[in-house]
Image (cartoon, rainbow, N blue to C red):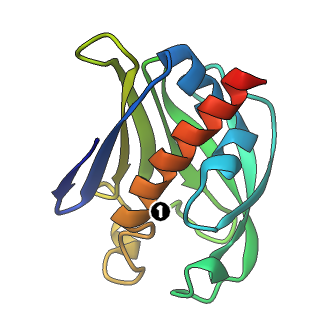
Amino acid sequence: MTQTAHMSDRIEVQRLIPAPAADVFQVLRDPRGHVAIDASGMLQDATGEPVSAVGDTFTVHMDREALNDYPLGKYDVGIRITTYEQDREIAWTIESTMLDPSIGHVYGYRLEDAPDGDGTLVTSYYDWSQIHEKYRGTLPFPVVPESALRATLGILERTVAMNRRS
């Protein structure tokens, strides 16, 4: 089951994942987990430790050529956690030395117990409503299309299932 909500500056997609929220959250708090589940093809690798609080950071090694939309090639971005509620919600913004000020878009996941108690309803969201005025109309938004957010949830389900089997 996948549902989608699309507002003017925000996308939300949902998927029921047949696993406890703690198992899902474990993937989402790990920098390598972000790379493992990325459906956009931009995330190539990550360095840093699993996050545990607002303000924690890690680095993601990117390749924008995967989207073929904006000629940035390979570059690194800093990820700063903006929301952290263990097993319930995690969100982050991207900081880059290439852009000053930072753009201000936010990616995140909300986790809720499934209505029937069997699994976790995962909402992936991408919000660019608070981007800095400097970037409005100059950069393509959304950077990650809705289809990639949906596909990432499918990969997340597969990754959680593989982790549970190991």
State the residue in front, 146 or 53. Answer: 146
**Picture layout, residue 114 above or below residue 83:** above
State the residue in front, 153 or 71. Answer: 153
User: In the image, 23: left or right of 152?
Assistant: right
Residue beneath disc 1: 103
Q: Residue at x 53, y 63 (%)?
A: 101
Q: Residue at x 75, y 42 (%)?
A: 32
User: In the image, 25: left or right of 52?
Assistant: left
State the residue in front, 98 or 92. Answer: 92
Identity of the residue furthest to the top in this view: 117
Please tell me whether mark 1 sits on a helix, a strand or a loop. loop
**Picture layout, residue 94 above or below residue 161:** below
Residue 144 drawn at (x, y percent): 44, 66
Q: Residue at x 55, y 66 (%)?
A: 40
Q: Is residue 104 visible?
A: no
Query: Which quadrant of the structure image shows residue 31?
Result: top right
Query: Which quadrant of the structure image shows residue 34?
Result: top right
Residue 56 drawn at (x, y percent): 66, 30
Quarter of the picture holding the C terminus: top right
Query: Which quadrant of the structure image shows residue 123?
Result: top left
Residue 165 drawn at (x, y percent): 72, 24
